[in-house]
Image (cartoon, rainbow, N blue to C red):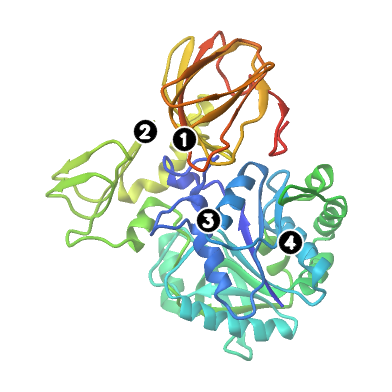
Amino acid sequence: MLHPVVLSGGSGSRLWPLSRHNQPKQFLALVGDRSLFQETVLRAGALPGMQPPVTVCSDGHRFMVGEQLQEIGVPNGGILLEPAARNTAPAIAIAALHVLASDPDATMLVMPADHLIEDESAFRTAVERAGALAKDGWLVTFGIHPDYAETGYGYIARGEPLENEGYRVGRFVEKPDLVTAESYVSDGTYAWNSGMFLFRAQAYLEELELQAPKILAAAKAAYAVAEGDLDFIRVGKDEFLSSPSDSIDYAVMERTERAALVPVSCGWSDIGSWSSLWSVAHRDDQGNFHEGDVISIDTTGSLVRASERRLIATIGVDDLVIVDTPDATLVARKDRVQDVKRVVEHLKDAGRQEHLFHRKVYRPWGNYDSIDMGARFQVKRIEVKPGASLSLQKHHKRAEHWVVVSGVAEVTCDDRVFDLHENESTFIPLGSVHRLRNRGTEPVELIEVQSGSYLGEDDIVRLEDVYGRS
């Protein structure tokens, strides 16, 4: 059977300020109404004989993965949690062990969670060709026909022809300079490295044993002690961290004699920058892509994305990227957007938080938006989903005032449990054990005012938690 494996470990820093560590690009609706992760899952699910998707992600993104699968009505074939990033070779290894546990003859279609494919029919044909090669023991990678000389992608040179319109892999090459990229495109035998693969799970592990045995040993040890946690699978932390950190390209595909290439032209993009998003977006007659409340006058070739509550107006500008969020705004020339990572590095070096979190932070129970703060206070707008509950908790350094603006909240404060209705408020003293719950069928919205000597999220002592965070 064919098992999709979705690798969802990226941070997406090149799409800052929209993509951030706690909500990277794969979970954002950048093109259309669904996230890139959801589009990847649905694309795989449309293939004949495909099993429920296996996702490999970080612990911090686990609830986002589960919730986005539920939104599109897709059952999960396993959400494997990486204790830390160790690149793609170990991640694919634990996924292979997982699918083999229930299907000894499993074939894996490995896909990054954050890629766009516009021509799904061409992709489906390529998967069929790759599947025929995989049956003969080949480890297949998909090479994208290069439409232009791109310096941001790696390339694959094709070797001798195989059956099913495939080729042996000639060689992998790193991201080239412009002159070299132009020579690859004119040569006609090079393809962009898509980072997508198809092979039998057992064949991958056998090749990993030959080429990178330490990675396989660590993956086996980590999966052997894996434990279920709600809908998630936690592999052994110490065992997984003992693995070398290597990509599948370096650990296996560049070394094996069984690497095959299936070329495909399917409208593929890794949406690795704001300029690449502009290039695949639906633009107007002036070459502009607008999202949100935008007015453009005498503006051409630009991407302008406004936040929910603010108008952006442009006059007489060309080839700009303007991305506005509630707490950060990016303005850059389209040909300089690769340098967004330098902004992220500045934020890290300065100890700031804007590369990690949006002002609105999503939690498994809902979300909160920090709408104002000062030296000893912070104001949040909180939304609790129907049937959801925050942890039973207390704080050592802050008190809280809650005002319900819609819905009915069940409040626990020490030994009292009571309902708080719209336009009612309550006070949670410093050190009190408290909980907020929504027993209704509509979201509960409230305003929380925190006051105290320290207001950080790490001043939360969780005593009970239905999401396993206590």
Tell me the distance, in whole angstroms, between the alpha carbons under discs 4 and 3: 23 Å
Choose mark 4 or mark 3, whichever is in front: 3
Residue bearing the label numbered 3: 71
Query: Is 233 drawn above or below residue 199 in the view shown?
Result: above
Residue 73 - label: none
Residue type, label 4: Ala
Query: Secondary structure beneath disc 1?
Result: loop
Choose mark 1 or mark 3, whichever is in front: 3
Residue bearing the label numbered 1: 358
Tell me the distance, in whole angstroms, between the alpha carbons under discs 3 and 2: 25 Å
Tell me the distance, in whole angstroms, between the alpha carbons under discs 1 and 2: 8 Å
Q: Earlier in the sequence, mark 1 or mark 2?
A: 2
Using residue 211 as the reference point, say whether residue 333 is left or right of it: left
User: Residue 97: x percent and y percent?
Assistant: 80, 63
Residue bearing the label numbered 2: 326
Identity of the residue drawn at 17% across and 59% down: 286
Query: Is 364 drawn above or below residue 433 in the view shown?
Result: below
User: Residue 176: x percent and y percent?
Assistant: 49, 61
Q: Earlier in the sequence, mark 1 or mark 3?
A: 3
